[in-house]
Amino acid sequence: MSIRILGTGSYLPEKVVTNEDFEKIIDTSDEWITKRTGIKRRHYVENGMWNKDMCVIAANIAMKEAGITKDDLGGIVVASVTNEMGVPSVASQIQRELEIPEAICFDVNSACTGFMFALKAVEGLLKPGGKPFLVCGSETLSRFMNMEDRASCILFGDGAGAVIVEHGDNMKYFEVYSKPDVDNTIVINGMNTLVDGVVQPSYATLKGKEVYVFATREAERVIRVALEATGKAPEEIDWFLMHQSNYRITKTIAQRLEMPMEKFYSNIDDTSNTSAASIPIALDQMNKKGMLKKGDKLVIAGFGGGLSSGCAVYEW
């Protein structure tokens, strides 16, 4: 597997929306939200900030850690479901913002598993001795929330995460999957568009029970497949890094694997579900906190709309 991570970065918008803030606008409570999701806060972009802006901030942090500059990049791949425009891609917007004259730039849309799919795509583009790539996950999901739908509006937040990767042998296993969502479990009907100066919103909708069943079963399945492929037992893994969708989902997966929650990094209380940005944000936080030691074995698993999933086993 031809991936080695050189640096990580992330950005969470400064505007924080708490559960108490939601109590003022919908029929809910901090206790209700926390008990069912583990979420206490989420970060929202404000007017004037786009996905590419958050990506550039996260990318600069990752490049600094990797010891490279924008001129060293061979490509940019962004995972997002919330690009503010159809064309150009967020990746191309970043290229323009960083003034990179030539690079391979494109976006990937695979909902909450998007970062995993973007990384998988880059795996096929990396070459021994070749230029490193920037891979970002970024979302402005707050702009797709129906604030009258208390079942969904509390779940999502904004943010961006980034990694700089080059050809290497640290990735010990990596697969992604797609299954048909015949029940329309997770849907965003279209992009928010501007008509006569007025935003025509397209709201995210999901079926909570069906999402929980799919996420817990599929995450357990792909993790067990990855462990079997690498000949590892769950107890040999130092960290399990899951897509941060719901604390109860992560807890259920830990219980099924018979692993302590201490091995499962969680930031859901502060970030909520940031879709494609979730995994790279969490990875950067773990990295910046000094939680990852050389030789540590990580299982990284994602699941989301499509229906999609993915799992990687990575040696730090």
Image (cartoon, rainbow, N blue to C red):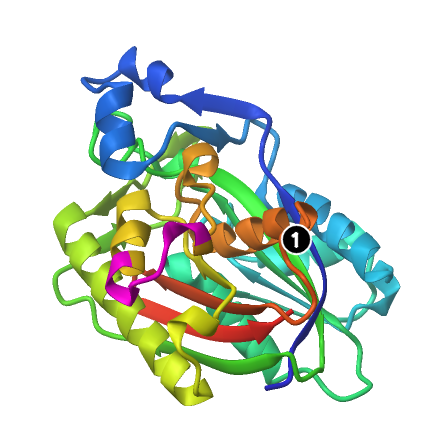
Around disc 1, counting alpha carbons within 10 Å, would you say few (fewer than 14), some (14 to 19), or many (20 or more)?
some
Q: Quadrant of residue 131?
A: bottom right
Please tell me which residue lies in front, 82 or 14: 14
Placement of the C terminus among the 4 image quadrants: bottom right
Picture coordinates of residue 32, whole percent (x, y): 21, 25
Asked if the magenta segment contains residue 260, the reply would be: yes
Write the start and end of the magenta stretch as one range. 255-262
* SS for dot 1: helix
The amino acid marked with disc number 1 is Asn
Placement of the N terminus among the 4 image quadrants: bottom right
Residue 88 visible, this orientation:
no
Which residue has dot 1 on it? 287
Residue at 65% x, 72% y: name it: 295
Q: Is residue 291 above or below residue 40?
A: below
Residue 191 visible, this orientation:
yes
Per the picture, the main secondary structure of the magenta-coloured stretch is helix
Q: Quadrant of residue 255?
A: bottom left
